[in-house]
Amino acid sequence: MLSDHQTAQMTHDGRGHDTSANRPPAPPASQLHTACARRSVAPVAIFDENEDARRHLHGMLSLLGFDVIEFATPAALFAALPAASPACVILDTCFESTSGREVQRQLHMLNPAIPLIFVTACADVRTAVKAVKAGAIDYLLKPASPDELMNALYVALASGEHRREDNGTRDRLRDSEA
């Protein structure tokens, strides 16, 4: 029988996030790099107005074996879709030109199958809750550790595969009814 402490460890990640939701379990940390790199054929997109933040994330993701594309403005990100077809979008929530939640809403309208991960210095619980309720995979605080980012990417890539499969099934059903 599990103690209350062991049960809490199984359902919370230490930051108060419930990890017992219907998410695929992450493999051991030693296998995350291989699993994520194998899954990601499409690039990971980074949208952050801060050039230093983009470069930092780009470097970290490149070292982890991902192809990365960067965007400094929402207009550049939206113009690149759907041609860029990213496996995942990593974005901040605090911008001078817009809000991360607005970018999330617009991205969802353009392509609901693209998983989103917020990496931000804005530690606002309400924004985090709203972002996750609206479909974000995770809400990480800067500077996110490579392990945190890898775990979120693993879930995002698995989630993206399921979302694309669901959209394909829906399209086939709609076509067969026509």
Image (cartoon, rainbow, N blue to C red):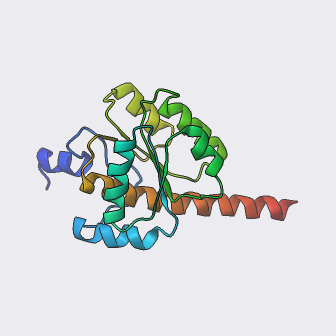
Residue sitting at 55 percent across and 36 percent down?
103
Answer above or below: position of 39 versus 142: below
Task: Work out which quarter of the rendered image holds the C terminus and state it.
Answer: bottom right
Q: Is residue 34 left or right of residue 48?
A: left
Q: Residue 166, image x and y in percent?
A: 62, 59
Residue occupying the far right of the picture: 178
Nearer to the camera, 51 or 57: 51
Residue sitting at 48 percent across and 34 percent down?
100
Q: Residue 159, image x and y in percent?
A: 48, 57
Residue sitting at 75 percent across and 64 percent down?
172
Answer above or below: position of 73 versus 95: below
Answer above or below: position of 134 versus 32: above
Residue occupying the far front of the picture: 51
Q: Residue 42, image x and y in percent?
A: 52, 65
Q: Quadrant of residue 65?
A: bottom left
Q: Quadrant of residue 124?
A: top left
Q: Residue 110, image x and y in percent?
A: 66, 45
